[in-house]
Image: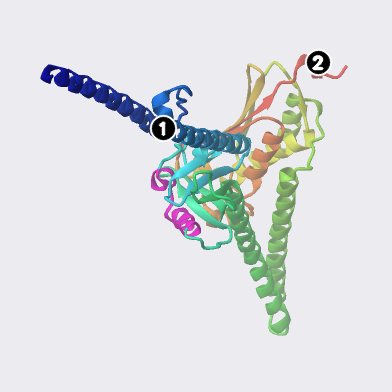
Amino acid sequence: MWPALAALFAVTAAFLAMRLWQLRSRLRDLADTAESRTPNFLDSGDALAQRYHLARLQRALDELASAHAQLERQERGYFAQLEATFANITEAVLLVDAAQRVVLANAAAGEMFGAEKVATGARLEAAVRGAGLMEYIYRTLRGESIPRAEFELPLTRDQKRWVEVSGAPLAAAAPDGRKLCLFVLHDITRLKSLENVRKDFVANVSHELRTPLTVIKGFAEALVEDDERLTREERLRFVDKIRRQTLRLVALVNDLLALSRLESEHHRLDLRMQSLRAIIEETTAEYAERFREAGVALELDLRHQDDMLRLDALKISQVFQNLFDNCLRYAKGFTRVRVLTRQEDERVRVTIEDNGCGIPAADVPHIFERFYRVDKGRSRESGGTGLGLSIVRHSILLHGGEALCESEEKGGTRIHFTLPVPAKDDFEV
């Protein structure tokens, strides 16, 4: 009897162990389903699963996993749509969550911050530069309503960028419940640069106008208030002073108008096929007497093959006039002026060279700027407006060429400019 009971006990233990193993296996499958959030359908005919209600639990978990997978697909589609939309926006766009991590950033944002790409999931501190901009983003994330603002971003030691930023929380949170804020940044560096140029221009014009106007006002008041005490010679001297300052004002206003017209978007050159040699010879003939009186030799070395160029003859003549006037005013101690032309592939290079005092190296990069003078006191005495070389540069740029300067102190100055050679089918028959 005892052997039979022992055998029955052994069979029962083995059956229970197998059942336990099967149950543990089914529970492990359920745990894997819950952790992986992927459906793992059991065999509907599994008696063990039916008996212990594991099939019901599995179906519930499968439904939850399917719903979660659908939500993930919706989230991926949601952000894919955002990425596709942001990729085609020229402004920089940042999507940031409450944990101050970048959820989404377009290519323009990477370019804005001087990087190839702003990494998704990166901390805000690693992606965004500029303390002012960071503070703006932090305050917006805290729920403050801040109007758009302008900030300066440091890119390198010598390069900075100005941006205008506006930010606001999104009405709907992300699918996973995160609260998001959207920031749009617009590059206004060029606008800031133009604004600074405008301010400098207004300041320079005001300064240039004030000096002759002050002189005219002073001598005019002296003529009125001291009329009875002034001698004829003093009156003539005062009137001559007024005349000279008036001429300076007229020259300044004329140069300002000329420069304004050249910089106007609507300005058009009167381009025609013209002989460059003829323009040079005609202009130098007009200045030959003035150079002769100054004891200066004027030499021509014209060696360009393509003589007929598409030019505005009046503007190119004014270019040579301004350059010759500069020589006469500022090239102290010079005895020779040379005009050289050379053929360079599809352009003609023109050089006006003098053997005067030259220009300090620090001043050379600035001489084409408006109102820039190397010797400011002497320039005003000579009647210069500081706009001649700016007019030269703009005229050449409108012709499709470029202008540059080479000079050394006591080594003379060379002003170069190029003019494009037209294609053969551009020539007039």
Residue 367's tag is: none
Instruction: Name the spot of residue 324 as percent of width and height, x first.
Output: 65, 39
Query: Which residue carries the number 2 mark?
Result: 425
Amino acid found under the numbered disc labelled 2: Asp
Q: How is the image coloured?
A: rainbow
**Is 351 displayed left or right of 266 in the figure?**
left
In depth, the one of 412 and 252 nearer the eye is: 252
Does the image show residue 406?
no
Amino acid found under the numbered disc labelled 1: Leu
Q: Which residues are magenta?
A: 123-141
**Is 356 displayed left or right of 202 in the figure?**
left
Please name the residue shown 78% across and 33% down the image.
Answer: 312
**Is 190 displayed left or right of 314 in the figure?**
left
Q: Secondary structure at mark 2?
A: helix
Query: Which residue carries the number 1 mark?
Result: 54
The numbered mark, 2 or 1, whose residue comes first in the sequence reads 1
Please name the residue shown 59% across and 53% down the image.
Answer: 171
Is residue 50 covered in magenta? Answer: no
The total of numbered circles placed on residues is 2
Q: Residue furthest left?
A: 2
Instruction: Name the spot of residue 367 as percent of width and height, x first.
Output: 55, 44
Rendered image quadrant of residue 416: top right
Instruction: Name the spot of residue 186 as percent of width and height, x first.
Output: 59, 47
Please name the residue shown 34% across and 31% down the image.
Answer: 27
Rendered image quadrant of residue 87: top right
Disc 2: CA contacts within 10 A as few (<14), some (14-19) or many (>=20): few
Main SS class of the magenta portion in the image: helix
In depth, the one of 307 and 328 nearer the eye is: 307
Q: Nearer the viewer, mark 2 or mark 1?
A: 1
In depth, the one of 70 and 125 nearer the eye is: 70
